[in-house]
Image (cartoon, grey):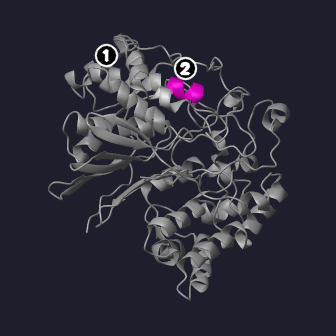
Amino acid sequence: MLNFVGVGPWPKAMPEDYFNDLHGGRVPPGILNTVVPAAPDIWLTALERFGTMSFAQVSRAAIRFARDGFPMYPFMREVLDAYRNDYKDEPSTTDIFMPGGKPPVVGELFYQRDLAATLSYLAEEETNAARNGDRAAGFRAARRAFYEGDIAAAIVEQQENLGGFMRRDDLASFRAEIEKPVRVSFRGHDLYGCGPWSQGPMVLAAAKLLEHSSIDETDHSSGAHIHTLTESLKLAAADREAYFGDPAHIDVPLDHLLSHDYLERRAELISRTASPGMPAPGIVPGVEPEPWQPDPSGSAPIGSMDGVETSYFCVIDRDGNLFSATPSDPTVGGAVVPGTGITTCMWGTRAYTGKSHPSRVGPGRRPRMAANPMLVIKPGELVMPIGSPGSEVLGQAQLQVLVNQLVFGMDPQSAVEAPRFASASWPASAIPHRYEPGRLNLEATIDPHVGDELAARGHDVNWWPERNWRAGSVCTIRADQKTGVMTAGADPRRSAYAIGW
């Protein structure tokens, strides 16, 4: 059981106090939000260590779709429409996403030919280097092509032209990191999530808080259930805000934060009334977190479509291997690197500029992500990958679908389609760290009387449309190890599919 650290660091040449001293705490847009792109090295490392195919083989379909086009679909068109004004000063981006000055209409073919050429270049370098059967040499060649060759040169040229800090050494020295996932038990199942560079331990802590509550005495669509799950998430989010960051740079007391006794005490704080905002973090002996205060970057404009850059997919192969991944990188902001079809990773937008924040921006540090693909395993009985896009909502959506299955006995598709809710009662990962104390969003399929009950408990209830895309897009596969039967759930809130063969 292994987990890839899915985000690269800020450039080493970035001054430690750059954002605070020169920009008054406001992270500037564009090139200064870029971090070292991690995805290509993660693809290649995963294939080399755990795969049987070459990069050329697995990228073949992606190259074809990028080169020959695929039909524009409604959700992608909605996203491009929402961000079309952001492309005005970025001709390399406009040329791709707004050919002729507007996004392609739904059903029209959409092309990314420069991206196809970039992927083809990596595949060709791999193929040429592996002609004598040396598979590892092929992966090394593909890695060099991206991180040291023509693509790296194009990235650095853009950085230098636009005032960015990334240099050749940042790219050449980068290597994907592999770590053991974080694990907790929940009702006899092992839940595996990503480390404290993500919101993984937050979701796992919320699950354990639920286990210490009377969650199985409620109905999944009742006010009591929604209230208990929401308050559990708030408590876990308070600890994330106080303690989580890049474990390569700070000491994150995960063993304490996920311990039975600690979470049992935290669960006692859940009462019949809602916390008016994010609760205080728990006490960790020997650690004194700074009191929470709004991040200086909170003065930045609020985006309208958080979480649209992310997707999710999971696979169980014929040998029983599980793969759970949350690919995520913005296409809706930042300038495309000319001639490559890619934007340099923009996840510096997950910066915190407050000097005391555990996830503050800094050279060589990794921004703290919202993404958290998960695995659920009950040895000898079931295995289940699960995940979702959706920024701050994705973990909440995953937890609801898990509870629907493991507590209330729903099949995967019913669990995914069940009415959903989402709290905004803690600061979001993305700039400007939007925070709406007490806000609880409910999908329209939830009974209005439940909304009234939640409002009476102190929640600031806001109604979403039925099956709103903002409520996440959970996908999952449930493999029964006793019968060999696999069932899946694909979320209708976005474009999602379950495929088996």
Q: What residue type is labelled 1?
A: Asp
Earlier along the polypeptide chain: callout 1 or callout 2? 2
Number of marks in the rendered image: 2
> Residue 450: image x %, image y %?
28, 20
Residue 152 vs 438, above or below: the answer is below
378 horizontally vs 12: left or right = left
Which stretch did the figure color magenta? Answer: 237-243
> Which residue is under mark 2?
284
Q: Which mark lies nearer to you, 1 or 2? A: 2
Mark 2, Cα crowd under 10 Å, few <14 / some 14-19 / many 20+, is some
Main SS class of the magenta portion in the image? helix
Residue at point 64%, 76% (across, down): 141
Confirm whether residue 286 shows in the render: yes
Residue at point 83%, 41% (across, down): 15
**Outermost residue to the bottom:** 132
Residue 150 vs 487, above or below: the answer is below
Q: Which amino acid does label 2 sit on?
A: Val
Q: Nearer the viewer, residue 331 or 444?
A: 331
Mark 1, Cα crowd under 10 Å, few <14 / some 14-19 / many 20+, is few
Residue at point 64%, 63% (across, down): 342
Residue 276 vs 435, above or below: the answer is above
The Cα atoms of the two marked residues, 1 and 2, are separated by 37 Å
> Which residue is under mark 1?
452
Instruction: Kindly check if marks 1 and 2 are in contact, taking CB atoms under 8 A apart as contact.
Output: no
